[in-house]
Amino acid sequence: MDGEQRFRQGDVVVHPRRPEWGEGVVNQAKSVTHDGRLAQRLVVEFANRGRVTLNTAVAPLAAKENAQTMSRSTMTNTTTTWGAGSSGGGWLAELERGSHENELWRLPEQVGDPFLSDVARLKATLELYRFSTEPRSLIDWAVAQTGLNDPLSKYTRHELELGFEGFARNREQHLRELVRNLKRQGQTPLIDQTRRETRYRGAKIALDKAMKA
C-alpha cells in the first residue's frame, strides 16, 4: 500500500460512496493482498449502518479530517445516534460503552464480507431469517448475537425484543442492498435460484419484497 493511506484501530473514517452511513470508527485493521496489491481488511462501526467489513482495494475509505481532535459534542451534533432510546453522548459514546443496541442490532460479519461473492452474502443473509420473535427462536438469536449461554442474565426479554426489531431492520436493509446490486449485475436468475433453495418462508417473503423495491 505504498503511497496509500493506512488505517489503524480507532481511526474515524467515512465511505465516499456511502455518505448515508455517516462516520465510522475502525475496530479492526488487517493487511491483506488483493489482486497482487497490498490492501487492508477493516471492520468499521458506522453511525448509521453498524458494523461493516471492508476491503480497501475495492471500497476506498477516507479519514475524517481532524477526527482525532474533534470533541465528542461536535461528533454528537453531526451524526445520528444508534437508535431511539439511546442515552446521551451520541453514537460514539454508545460505541465506546459497548451499548446493548450495538451488540444486538449488528449483523454477522459474513453477510458483508467483501471476500465473498454477492450470491454467497445473499445466502448468508437469508439464513438469518431462521430467527424470529417466537420465544425459543428469540433466545437462539440472542445466544448467537451475544455469545452468552443465557442472554437473559444480561438482558430482559423486553430488551431482547426491542433489540431484535433493530436487527430485523438491518437485516431487511442489507437484503435490499444485496438484491439491488445483483439485479444491477444482471444476476436475477441467481436470485431466483437462491430463493428456491432457501428453507425459510420468512426469507422467501423478504426476498420477494426486496425484488419489488
Image (cartoon, rainbow, N blue to C red):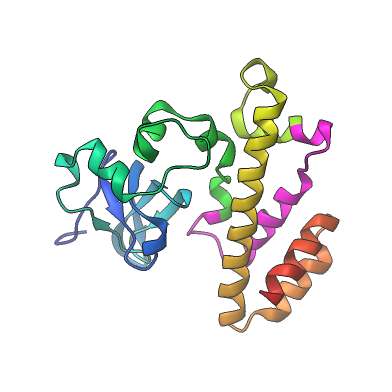
Prevailing secondary structure class for the magenta stretch in the rendered image: helix
Specify whether residue 144 is in view: yes
Q: Is residue 56 left or right of residue 143?
A: left
**Percent coordinates x, y for residue 28 in the rendering:** 36, 41
Which residue is at 73% across, 68% downward? 209
Q: Quick one: which residue is furthest to the bottom in this view?
A: 186
Residue 144 vs 1, above or below: the answer is: above
Which residue is at 14% across, 62% downward? 3
Residue 94 vs 15, above or below: the answer is: above
Which residue is at 25% across, 36% downward? 72
Report which quarter residue 15 is drawn in.
bottom left
Q: Is residue 56 left or right of residue 84?
A: left
Counting every numbered tag in the picture gives 0
Residue in the foreground of this view, choosing between 183 and 105: 105
Residue in the foreground of this view, choosing between 141 and 29: 141
Which residue is at 63% across, 22% downward? 155
Residue 190 vs 76, above or below: the answer is: below
Write the start and end of the magenta stretch as one range. Answer: 112-138
Specify whether residue 30 is in view: no
**Percent coordinates x, y for residue 37 in the rendering:** 29, 64
**Percent coordinates x, y for residue 33 in the rendering:** 34, 58
Q: Quadrant of the C terminus?
A: bottom right
The question of residue 28 being in magenta is answered with: no
Report which quarter residue 152 is drawn in.
top right
Q: Quadrant of the N terminus?
A: bottom left
The question of residue 122 being in magenta is answered with: yes
Report which quarter residue 164 is drawn in.
top right
**Percent coordinates x, y for residue 52 in the rendering:** 46, 51
